[in-house]
Image (cartoon, grey):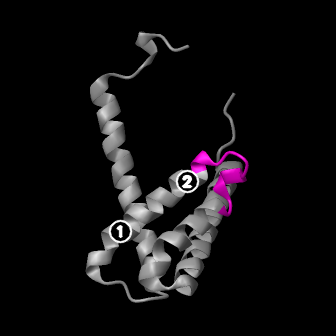
Amino acid sequence: ILSGDALPPFSGMLLLVARYCIVWILQGIGFACALKALAPIPFNSILPVIGGNALAWLAGFLVLVTPAGLGVREIMLTRILKSGFGSGPAAMAAVIARLFIVCSELLGSAVLLIFGHSRR
């Protein structure tokens, strides 16, 4: 159990939450761009797309029986977005978003393997 000394100050935690909000917004905008390549997105639908992306990620995070929410996130995104964009574009955008996530993780792992050697 962490002691009170091990926790960051409250202002540091607020800054961390603010930074994560920026990350979620940017990730949602990226997802909206993937969806826009498949179906037209009215400007007033961008915020629900960003929120739907975050909600689907949360659902995938909470389901512990699948690695990285595999399948759960995509199903949730498709269900959230199908009424506004159709099942096909919503499902395709969810799969494309998963592929981008996997590719970014593979790229990050490769960079660490190549340049992240320990200096002990």
Residue 68 forms part of the magenta stretch: yes
Label located before the other in sequence (2 or 1): 1
Q: Badge 2: how crowded within 10 Å, few (<14), some, or many (20+)?
A: some
Residue 82 seen in render: yes
Q: Measured from the top left, where is residue 50 in percent x and y? A: 39, 65
Callout 1 crowding tier (Cα within 10 Å): few <14, some 14–19, many ≥20 = some
Q: Residue at x 73, y 48 (%)?
A: 65
Secondary structure at badge 2 equals helix
Q: Amino acid at mark 1?
A: Pro
Question: Can you say whether 65 is above or below 44 in the image?
Answer: above
- 34 to 63, vertically: above or below: below
Q: Which label number is shown at residue 103?
A: none
Give the numbered dot on residue 59.
2
The residue that disc 1 covers is: 48
Please, what secondary structure does the residue beneath circle 1 have? helix
Q: Position of residue 49 (x, y in %)?
A: 39, 70
- Would residue 14 be found to the left or right of residue 6 on screen? left
The residue range painted magenta reads 61-71
Q: Left or right: 6 with respect to 113?
A: left
Badge 2 amino acid = Ala
Q: Position of residue 16 (x, y in %)?
A: 36, 38
30 vs 113: above or below: below
